[in-house]
Amino acid sequence: MTQPADAPKKRLPTRLVEVVLMLLMLALIGLVSAQIFMRYVLWSPLIWSEELARMVFVYLTFIGAGLAFHRGENLRLGVLTDVLPEGARLWLRVAIYLVEIGFMGVVLAYSAPLLARLYPAHTPALEWSMVSFYAGVAVGGAVILAYAVAGLVRTLAALRRRGRA
């Protein structure tokens, strides 16, 4: 998939997100491998590894969704956008960013009270607060929101440049 002409260059925040995702993936692979080895080779399963692997997977999924959104690799249908002229395509992209910003704003607004309610509850094996499990949704939502705002600013700048040309 080709990036649009106004696509962002890799900057430090995106590199940091990529590093975090790589570390999470390595952790997930290590946890699942240890779980398999302990269960089927040593016949002494780890009681906490499955729970931690699920928690890592939640963070990996939602932060990864933010990076996919940033790169434009999320699911989309280009039937309409591919036939639109560039100006209309940019305005459509502005509308999409605004919807995304609104949706992520709602997700984050509802996440805060949910996390506050979950604070006293603990995970069964690790005995960590359930906040550590469900915060992955809020963290991923914040990543998506940040990329959506940056994309909106970039697209508006492209519209301004196009208006001057």
Image: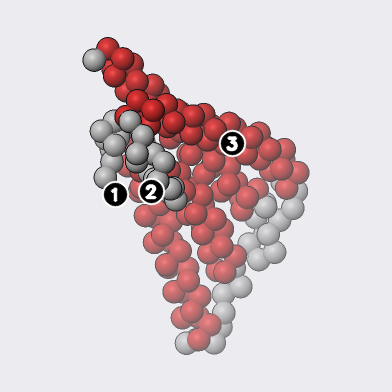
Occupied quadrant, residue 85:
top left
Label 3 sits on residue: 103
Spatial separation of the CA atoms under disc 1 and disc 2: 8 Å
37 displayed left or right of 44 = left
Residues at marks 2 and 3 touching, judged by CB atoms closer than 8 Å: no
- Residue at image point 44% right, 74% down: 33
Looking at the picture, the colour scheme in use is: secondary structure
Label 1 sits on residue: 1
Mark 1 crowd level (few <14, some 14–19, many ≥20, 10 Å Cα): few
Q: Position of residue 94 (x, y in %)?
A: 45, 28
- Residue at image point 53% right, 64% down: 53
Q: Amino acid at mark 2?
A: Glu
Q: Amino acid at mark 3?
A: Phe
- Residue at image point 35% right, 25% down: 87
Q: Which of marks 2 and 1 precedes in the sequence?
A: 1
Q: Which mark is residue 73?
A: 2
